[in-house]
Amino acid sequence: MTSSVAPAASAAGAARIVGVSFGHATLAEADHWIGGLSPAPVLACTHLVATPFPHVAISLLTVTAVATAPDLRPAADAAAAGQTGRAVRFPGVERLTGELTVSEILQRSSISRVEVLGSGPADPDTLVDTCDFVRPQFRGGELVLVTTPAAGGRLVPFERRDPTPCCAGH
């Protein structure tokens, strides 16, 4: 899965949303591809798409254009038009390491809200163990970090780098 990155055709080099699809089978594959982009996009989100087959497409807020194979163009277009996604790259992501309060997360990054799964907004003073892996959801123009309760009254991001497979012990 290779990509072709070329200068954007925009006049002033303004960042714009572009969609791309290379048929990545997993989120990890798409994350790895995003991590290799230079220059890094301002925002990069993954999107699960069904056409022409189930895979992960990507939307980027960038000044570069990315070529997509014609048969995957519908998936790339769907990613670019998507109102929801999973943010991999976003302003401040590099400052979200270790344990931080909800308030610090909001101050250090472009995340707009931190929620506790099934419970609503998280208290600003609650500690979040980021596990150095933060993947907020992009919803209707804002980034929302979904968390779950953890030991010691802390929170952890809902999405983990190495999740335990469902029914792993069965």
Image (tube, rainbow, N blue to C red):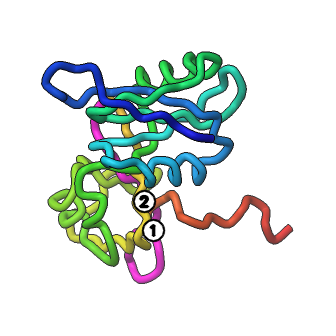
User: Residue 64: where, in percent of width, then height?
Assistant: 32, 32
- The residue that mark 1 highlights is 149
- The residue that mark 2 highlights is 147
Say whether residue 125 is left or right of residue 26: left
Residue 135 image label: none
Above-or-below relation of 74 to 134: above
Which residue is found at the position 29% from the left and 64% from the top?
94
Quadrant of image for the N terminus: top right
The answer to which of 83 and 61 lies nearer the viewer is: 61
Above-or-below relation of 101 to 62: below
Say whether residue 166 is left or right of residue 105: right
User: Residue 39: where, in percent of width, then height?
Assistant: 31, 47
- The crowd level at tag 2 (other Cα within 10 Å; few <14, some 14-19, many 20+) is many
Looking at the rendering, which quadrant does residue 55 occupy?
A: top right
Label 2 close to label 1 by CB (< 8 Å): yes
Q: Give the range drawn in magenta.
A: 141-155
